[in-house]
Image (cartoon, grey):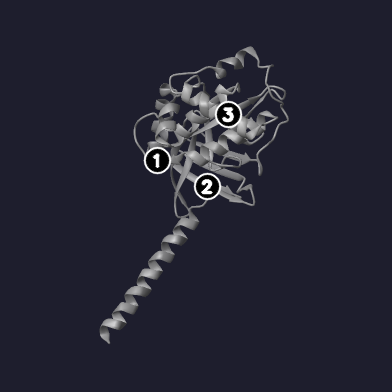
Amino acid sequence: MVSIRKAKYLLLFLILVVLSVQLSKAQMQTDLIVDGRRTPTKCVFRISNPKGLYNFSNYTCPSFSQNIEKLSDTTVKITVNVSEFLPHPKQVLPITNIPQEVQKYLSPTKHIQSDNPEITKIAKEINESSKPKTEAELVEAVLTWIRSNLRYGELNKEITDALTALNRKSSQCVGFAHLSVAILRNLGLPIRTVRTYALCCCGKTPTHFTRHSLIEVYYPDDKQWILYDPQSPVSPSPAQIYLYSDADWNQKKHDECKPFCLDSNTHIEVMTLE
């Protein structure tokens, strides 16, 4: 009789533990998709460090914007807004009016082997099966393929190039970005990589930033770049801060932004998340 009572208490305890874990996970959701739209769409950060700040800058595109308000030499307020739905520019294919200064984002690089035969094969298959008429449709087709064929892998110190991500069928965010850029460049689109600080939380409490990788696509008719997250079917999460863009992985810029987010003196306050 006693053992049965103990078993009941143990079962109740386990149920409470499971519910607690599920609640904790729910509280950490700063990145939700509801009925195909992004929510939340606004995040306001207050970031401080007594030793000084990272050189944040304003950024604006149709899917993501951030405004920097320096409150002091050690404190900054950053307001990030994202679109509820991804923009769909009507740029038709093929693209021919690419400005000279943007053409460097069409070429293969060390980590983005867009001219590799395996990349070419995948790019051709995606293009033929999706039959896109606009650049936005082609981007959507490629990123849909990426999310269906690449899983998020374990953290490691290597910089995963596009071909490695393709062959392993798994990667961190860097590999997602590099493979996406490689396929899209192979198909004639100007694309660049982007680095951000992404917010990490414990329950509802922001604890630190980690580095995240996104991509930008250039639309010649509108003369603008649009920011995409290869791991998400909607606009990028507002719980992140745009740092810089480049044609490929930039170790120097990475080393410059890394210390600030790892510094225990960096304090993050989320003033608004809606």
Q: Amino acid at mark 2?
A: Val
In depth, the one of 250 and 270 nearer the eye is 250
* Residue that label 3 marks: 216
Tag shown at residue 119: none
Measure the C-alpha gap from mark 3 to mark 2: 26 Å
Q: Earlier in the sequence, mark 1 or mark 2?
A: 1
In depth, the one of 145 and 45 nearer the eye is 145
Q: Tell me what residue is drawn at x 54 percent, y 37 percent.
A: 145
Q: Of circles 1 and 3, which is in front?
A: 1
SS of the residue under disc 2: strand
Packing grade of label 1 (10 A; few <14, some 14-19, many >=20) is some
In the picture, the quarter occupied by the N terminus is bottom left
Q: Position of residue 116 (x, y in %)?
A: 47, 21
* Residue that label 2 marks: 270
Q: Position of residue 14 (x, y in %)?
A: 36, 69
Q: Amino acid at mark 1?
A: Gly
Compared across the picture, whether 186 is left or right of 252 comes to: right
